[in-house]
Amino acid sequence: MVRFSRWGLCAVALCAAFAAVEANAKATSDVVTVSAVTDHSGVLPGGKIRAAVVIAIQDGWHTNSHKPLDKYLIATVLKLEPLEGVTAGEFAYPPGEEIKLAFSDGLVSVYEGKTAIGVPLEVAQSVATGTLTLKGSLRIQACDDKSCLGPSTIKFEVPIKVLAPGETPAAQEAELFAAIDKYSETKPAEATAKPAVVESASAVKTTQPAAAQTWQELLPQFEIAGQSGFVSTEEFLKWIDRSEKGEAAPQSGGLLGLTGSVATGGFTLKGLGLPLVILLTLIGGITLNLTPCVLPLIPVNLAIIGAGVRAGSRTKGFLLGGMYGLGTALLYGVLGLVAVLGAASFGSLNAQWWFNAAIALVFVVLALAMFDVILIDFTKYQSKLGIRKDSGNYLFAFIMGAVNALLAGACVAPVVIAVVLYSQDAYARGAAIALALPFLLGVGMALPWPFAGAGLAHLPKPGMWMVRVKQAFGVFILLFSAYYGYQAYGQFSARYLVDKSAVLASAQTSAEEGWVTSLDEGLAQARREKKPVLIDFWATWCKNCLYMNETTFKDPAVLKRLENFVKIKYQAEDPESSPAKDVLANFEYVGLPLYVVLLPK
């Protein structure tokens, strides 16, 4: 048997390696740089100046133009932050170059090499002399001939020097702005009483009619009736039925079927999942008392707290044993709450392949500890606490129960860690009952103690059978490892082993079959027609999205069932960035695909 430190370092190193694979992937900033210049060295108060946002793209790479030929592609979009005293006019985007790529069926409109976006600016008469800093961002997706990086937002700044009366601004960057003049005649926006920079060109006054309401205004007018991920066609139909009726619509929550009920705000389990999980956890806690690290020490601990034959009466022994067990149960409950509620990032992390792979590795290490291959034992720290022994005292019995639970032995610690890790994951998936699992494990361990303290329980004779019990826990933990390993493989495969062009083509076909691609338009239509809504969140890197498009959404029964729905396809190419992040924040997002049913209020 080797010490945990060596194995622990290996585990940490491998976990770091998983994260490094993701972190070291080529970033958009490696292939695209964004800067800004102005056409004059400065501007007088009340005057006008033009800025150019320069996009430099590495050879062999491109970005989609501002107006891609395919509405599913990520367009290049410029945004400016509000700046008092400065008004922006309509942005002058360069025209895209139409080319044929390996992954596209037809031509695509792209930017290559070096190009620029023109931005006319007007400075208010009231602006004082000095330098203003106009901040902005450019939303792009960089691709080569075979694949694309994730969408990215690159920030930049435009320094605007406001001159004193009498100073003359000098012209600069004439060649660059002459090129901008060739593809667009920039027109400054009309000055307003309170000038402010608009966040995007679409907000500038143009001839195009604006949408009556945005999705942010429309969404509160609907009730979230159901959320689901990747499921079979049969399960999808059942889920649609439950959602439209306003019944609980579960979303998958892990190995034991823990699920969150969106419609009711409560939480449940599939079928008999809830009582089964509670029963299994309690039995697991009781069984831990039969491991070789716990069973032989029960008489010793009873003697230390003054229970058993030393209690003087069965009632006192029962109460002392009960206090000892209560300390154990509450300690595990508190540890579980702190660990689970403190892991706020689990909701997004458990959708990452490398995170689930790391969890699988940790479970392998914990299982090896149950087979005595490595040692995880915190009892060596018990003597350092200096707790004064006071036999027969209820508070002392409670403290001893909590201390022994905290400094769990080699047979108990791996199981406790495994339960806490699983609870974190299940809670992040929407199962509130997961908060109670560590406490229930402690309750299971505590149940025999009142009876043992009263002398009413007959303790089994120690033997090799205890080792087998410990090893059985190891097998159970290995099952969890296999589950998370399977999750990691599925996520890795769905993200990196997917034909993006096939997903895109499938989404295009769906659009031709009655799906709406604008969230604003889809919600507005559903509101007018008083129809339920189905939102399909997808991305080109999502293999399961393609599978659902080609199977479930082509099934005759599903097509007929969705006839009365307004169906929306929302491309969440980069769920961690706006605008997809803002939309997904309203739902229980843990990965793609994500399906949401909304009912008009």
Image (tube, rainbow, N blue to C red):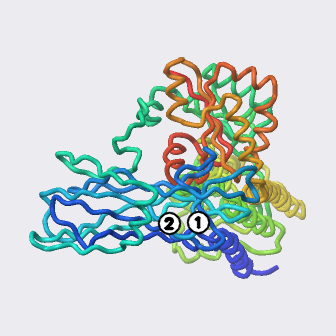
Q: Which mark is residue 74?
A: none
Residue at image coords 70%, 65%: 358
Left or right? Give the position of 87 relative to 495. left
**Quick one: 503 or 306, which is closer to the camera?**
503
State which quarter of the image contains the N terminus. Answer: bottom right
Q: Position of residue 209 (x, y in %)?
A: 41, 33
Coordinates of residue 546 in the picture (x, y in percent): 76, 44
Mark 1 is on which residue type? Glu
| Closer-to-camera residue (6/42) | 42
| Foreground of the two, 195 or 351 | 195
Horizontal arrangement in the rendering, residue 460 relative to residue 567 (left or right): right
Residue 380 spot, x, y in % from top left: 64, 76
Q: Is residue 307 visible?
A: yes
Amino acid on which the number 2 mark rests in the picture: Thr
Mark 2 Cα shell of 10 Å, populated few (<14), some (14-19), many (≥20)? some
Please provide percent x and percent y for residue 449: 67, 51
Category of crowding for the residue at label 1, using alpha-carbon neighbours closer than 10 angstroms: few (below 14), some (14–19), many (at least 20): some
Q: Secondary structure at mark 2?
A: strand
Picture mark count: 2
- Residue picked out by circle 1: 112
Report whether residue 312 is seen. Answer: no
Query: Pointer 2 and pointer 1: residues touching (CB < 8 Å)?
Result: yes
Q: CA distance from mark 2 to mark 1?
A: 7 Å
Q: Would residue 455 appear left or right of 189 to someone viewing this image?
A: right
Q: Nearer the viewer, residue 397 or 340?
A: 340
Q: In the image, which disc is placed on residue 115?
A: 2
Residue at screen point 37% across, 40% down: 206
Q: Secondary structure at mark 1?
A: loop
Residue farthest along the left direction in this orientation: 165
